[in-house]
Image: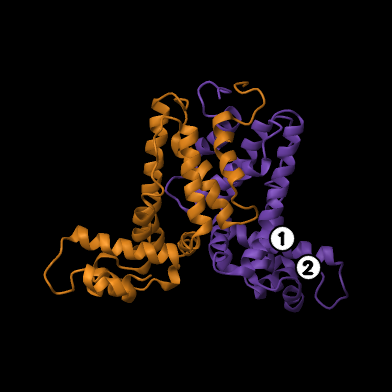
Chain colours: A orange, B purple
Amino acid sequence: MTKQAEGADERPARGRGRRPADEVRADVFRVVGEILLQEGIADLTFERVARLSGVSKTTLHKWWPSKGSLALDGYFHAVQETLAFEDTGDIRADLTSQLRAFARIMTRTPAGRVVTELIGQSQTDENLATAFRSLYSSERRRLAGERLLRAREQGQIRDEVDVQVLVDQLWGAVYHRLLIPDEPVTDDFVVALVSNLIDGIAPSPGTP
Amino acid sequence: MTKQAEGADERPARGRGRRPADEVRADVFRVVGEILLQEGIADLTFERVARLSGVSKTTLHKWWPSKGSLALDGYFHAVQETLAFEDTGDIRADLTSQLRAFARIMTRTPAGRVVTELIGQSQTDENLATAFRSLYSSERRRLAGERLLRAREQGQIRDEVDVQVLVDQLWGAVYHRLLIPDEPVTDDFVVALVSNLIDGIAPSPGTP
């Protein structure tokens, strides 16, 4: 984070008049995303986000009532582009590349630990659990579902398949290895997740 | 739990001589399992287990250094029979019935909450995470792997399939819905988990 030094010239100082809310939120998301992807959740404080984004702590607290909601909203926006669902017309290729990007973020950046700790804490913190679902997981589920539905419409997935189940068998399977690390998240694993579903695991596919 | 009242006559009192370790452990597992499946982890204390099992707190603490390890070991043994992997020769039927039993325990008994809370806490508690893997998940993974390997040997699963990936796409997918409950664990879900993998999701199975 070298933004602090650069920030003074780049951002309007507080009190110079009201900036559009979208612009303010974008600044906050960028700062939160950088902290989470480069450092981790321990380094995320309202104090620091206020300093680095030029947004008052009062405003931050008004929009994000807890550190968890600030982290989740910032994380969602930070990974939105990297985790976008491409549509090259080939569902196998598109799922594999998206899952690779997801696995990379989860295993090679501090964000993986941030997310698993938030999931962990949300098992006993109902407010955090609600924030996790509304600010992160349900929206990621919706985006994955959209891409899978398009593949179904294009005839790459059978009509009767409930695409939401596939979300659990692809990304959910990765979360399982992250949360209970008996086995590692490797590239072979990611490739197998997709091919097991698309090709099926039976020797003579289609045999009832 | 009515065992306390019954217990006095049924179990050798403490100090009447040493019972075989296996017998003592079986008593402890039964008591811990009953508490977890009927009440939950809040009601599990060394004090109470000692009282209900007739095993001294000193012995309990010697064998299980933490409440987490006592809960996990007890839970593993409590569900061992219900979650056994049948072999009728039909992997689709056997997986579906095992997953139904698993889903039932996780959604209809307090054990579901016990397990998700232990997974949650293990994200920030390294000792608990180690205990979870060694006393529970790695052993469940091994048992599932054995059944799946047998199906592969019988020609019901393709030779090149890594059966450990299937563990994440079946039980891991259920854990995903339990830990991040955007979608419910229903019977349709369980059936779809198995058929998506066995039949594949592509319309003309086998098409590259």
Q: Which quarter of the figure has residue B29?
A: bottom right
- B35 on left or right of A115: right
The residue lying at 59 percent from left, 58 percent from top is B38
Q: Of residues A105 and A137, which is closer to you in this image?
A: A105
The residue marked by circle 2 belongs to what chain?
B
The quadrant the C terminus of chain A occupies is top right
Q: Which residue is mark 1?
A: B30
| Left or right: A51, with B5 as reference point | left
Q: Determine the residue positioned at 71% across, 53% down.
A: B139
Q: Is residue B151 above or below residue A178?
A: above
Residue B174 seen from this side: no
Mark 2 vs mark 1, foreground winner is: 1
Subunit bearing disc 1: B
Residue A168, percent from left and from top: 50, 43
Q: What is the distance, in whole Å, between disc 2 and disc 1 at their CAs?
A: 17 Å
Q: What residue sits 67% from the left and 67% below the top? A: B69
Q: Position of residue B85 (x, y in %)?
A: 71, 42
Mark 1, secondary structure of its residue = helix
Q: Quadrant of the N terminus of chain A?
A: bottom left
**Residue B132 drawn above or below residue A104:** below
| A30 vs B13: above or below | above
Vertically, is B186 above or below B80?
A: above
**Numbered disc 2: secondary structure:** helix
**Amino acid of disc 2:** Asp
- Foreground pick, B158 / B72: B158
Same chain for mark 2 and mark 1? The answer is yes
Instruction: State the mark number for residue B9.
Output: 2
